[in-house]
Each structure stands twice: as C-alpha cells, then as structure tokens.
Amino acid sequence: MQIQEMQSEIMRLKRERGVCVLAHAYQSHDIWEVADYVGDSFGLSQQAAQADAHTVLMCGVRFMAETVKILSPQKRVILANADAGCPMAEQVSFDVLSQLKQKYSDHTVVSYVNTTAKLKTISDVCVTSSAAVKIVKNIANDKILFIPDCNLGSWIQKQVPHKQFQFVPGGCPTHLLITPKNVEQARQRHPGALLLVHPECSEKVVELADYVGSTTQIMDFAKQSQATEFIIGTENSIVQHLQIACPEKRFYALSKNCICHNMKATTLGDVYNCLKGIGGEEIELDAETLQLARRSIDEMLRLG
C-alpha cells in the first residue's frame, strides 16, 4: 500500500466510524494530512471536546491523551502508540509532589500541562507554555511551586519577578540537547535568520533568541513575519512543516539532535491500525482522577 492509499483509507475509516484524529505539531507530515486538528497539546484537547465524534484518536504522547480524556470523559480516547510517553511529564512522582506540597504549604502548585493526570489531581493550577506568564501573574499568591520544567519556570519567573518561585530539577530532554554552541554555529551559517526557540530550552539558549514562544506561537510568528529566514529551536519536525507551509521562506534546524523519539514513535501505520480496531491503547481514568485533575485545568481557564 502506498502512503496516499493508506491516507485515503484512514480518511474513509474515520468518517465511517466517527473518529476525530488529533495530531500534535511534532508528528510527521503524513499524519498531519489525515488529522482533523493539528496543534499544541491543550488546544487539541479543547478541539476534541467540541467535536461531534464519540471517539478521539490522539497522535501524540500519553499525557496528551489523558488531558483529552479529562476534558471529554464521556468519549472514548485512544493513544495511537502505547509506547509514546513523555519523560518530562513523568519526572516528578505523585509522592514527591505530595512531599513538596507539605514542605511548601504556603505555595500555589503550578503544573505545566505536560504532566500526568495523577499529578494534576494535586496541583492547584495548570499552565500551557503560551499562557503561563499570564496565568501566573493572575494567581493571587506570590509564592509559586512550579513543576516539572525548571527552564520554563525560570523563563516565567523573569517575566514575573515580584513572585517567589520554587523549582524541582527537570525539563524536556529533547530541548535540553540544544546548546549555546548550536546557536553560535547556526548564526554563523545563517547570519540573516531570526532565531525562534521554545521556552523549554535552557536559559542560556533562550537568552540568545529573537523570539520565544510555544510551538504554535513559533509557527505563527514565522508565517506572519516579514523575515524570510528562520532558525527553529524546537523539535525538528517543525522545520519541515514550516517549509511546506511557507515555501517562499527558508527554515533551518537549530540542532540536528532536537528530535523527540516519543513523538516519532507514532506512525501512519499506527493510525491506520487504530482505525481498524487492532492498535493503540484506550485511555481510562477513574472518576476521582477525572474530577480532581479537571479542577486544575478549570483554574487555568479561569486565570488565563
């Protein structure tokens, strides 16, 4: 079967079986082409909640599928590849966060949406990378316990300097592969290009950027900018997606090593098999987890 034939069959099956297909921005372009919605993780779960489909197929990683289930508990949610996890989301355990809550009992627990459903149950509020600064500014408490990404947390702290932050060691292992040396080399090769990076990159890399934002914000910036050359400091699939969207512009990867193997675990064949009913994993969360995790998400929406 050729790629286009498989894509055609996927389109037929999802219509026939009432399935909404979500693709995170870091998925490959052949998966993008069969998705109903493409974007950042939380935006996808909001789209899924509004969709008429009774089954949702997440082409991403586990915490994203869990968030879809939290927002759409009545829907059947399938993770396209059961092995697609997120090391950052799993860096802080439930027990460790429970201990930290006791130690910093006067702090508001702010969890990056890139956390497990279980961690969300004992968090006060979640944040996305795009809305984190606004949400933290709107929190009444001046003391923040931020998990799990201390790089994102540090970036927020610099923009909300009047608040006190506590962090735990953690971050995205993929974005941490990008170094200031990569920036130096990329600037030398492409002196006229703008550098766009994700706040999950190290503080030293973020300080060198022309623009810092979420994956969707980076893509929107590049599309709307009058500039014609860009160095992309996030998962390398974004370089290809932008080249396809803006063929008149040039895009370069900041580091050839910035590849998320968990995102790459999902293939077009996985999507096809899930729609045939022979692949993926259904995400099931108990009623208490759904209720408690939803509170931190609702608080995010209220504040942001």
Image (cartoon, helix red, strand yellow):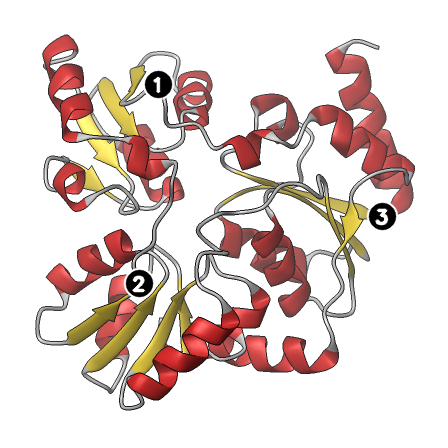
Q: Quadrant of residue 266?
A: top right
Q: Earlier in the sequence, mark 1 or mark 2?
A: 2
Question: Horizontally, is 164 left or right of 103 in the view?
Answer: left
The residue shown at (39%, 13%) is 247
In what quadrant of the picture does the C terminus appear? bottom left
The residue shown at (27%, 90%) is 106
Question: Horizontally, is 121 left or right of 192 in the view?
Answer: right
Q: Quadrant of residue 284?
A: bottom right
Vertical comparison of 140 with 266: above or below: below
The residue labelled by disc 3 is 18
The residue shown at (33%, 56%) is 149
Where's residue 290, x and y in %? 66, 75
Amino acid at circle 3? Gly
Point out the frontmost of discs 3 and 1: 1
Q: Earlier in the sequence, mark 3 or mark 1?
A: 3
Q: Which sits in the foreground, 104 or 182?
A: 104
Vertical comparison of 155 with 261: above or below: below
The residue labelled by disc 1 is 256
Name the mark on residue 108.
none
The residue labelled by disc 2 is 132
Q: SS at mark 1?
A: loop
